[in-house]
Image (spheres, helix red, strand yellow):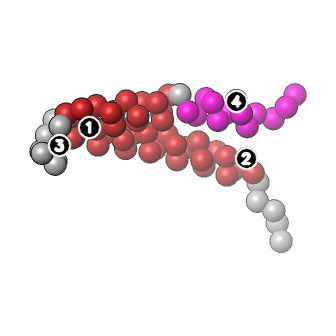
Amino acid sequence: MSEKDPAAARFAAIQLTRLTGVACVVLGIVIATDRILPGLPDWVGYILIANGLVDVFVIPPILIRKWRTPK
């Protein structure tokens, strides 16, 4: 049997992190504009937006640096 490439799993994890971040941003915008769940306060949407932006722009570079192949 062939072994799985660890780089493929790491790439998938990074892309899943980014996709989750985008989903959080979209859900946060929808909540903040009272399109769904109108009973929730706006700050819940803003927290989701901030969390999503961190997931998209901060976490992937950290993972890339952590998993980089040593020179």
Q: Is residue 65 magenta?
A: yes
| Total numbered labels | 4
Quarter of the rendering occupied by the N terminus: bottom right
Q: Secondary structure at mark 3?
A: loop
Tell me the tag on residue 65.
4
Quarter-of-image position of residue 27: top left
Q: Secondary structure at mark 4?
A: helix
Residue pictured at 58% horizontal, 34% vertical: 60
Is 55 on the left-hand or right-hand side of 61?
A: left
Is 18 on the left-hand or right-hand side of 35?
A: right
Q: Which residue is mark 2?
A: 7
Measured as percent of width and height from the top left, residue 59 is found at 55, 33
Measured as percent of width and height from the top left, residue 4 is found at 76, 59
Tell me the tag on residue 6.
none
In terms of sequence position, does the residue under pointer 2 or pointer 3 come before the other? Answer: 2
Residue pictured at 26% horizontal, 37% vertical: 44
In terms of sequence position, does the residue under pointer 4 or pointer 1 come before the other? Answer: 1
Q: Residues within 10 Å of mark 3 (few under 14, many from 20)?
A: few
Q: Which residue is mark 3?
A: 40
Magenta stretch, residue numbers: 59-71
Quarter of the rendering occupied by the C terminus: top right
Q: Secondary structure at mark 2?
A: helix
Q: Are marks 1 and 3 in contact (CB under 8 Å)?
A: yes
Q: Which residue is mark 1?
A: 44
Mark 4: amino acid: Arg
Distance between the Cα atoms at labels 2 and 4? 13 Å
Mark 2: amino acid: Ala
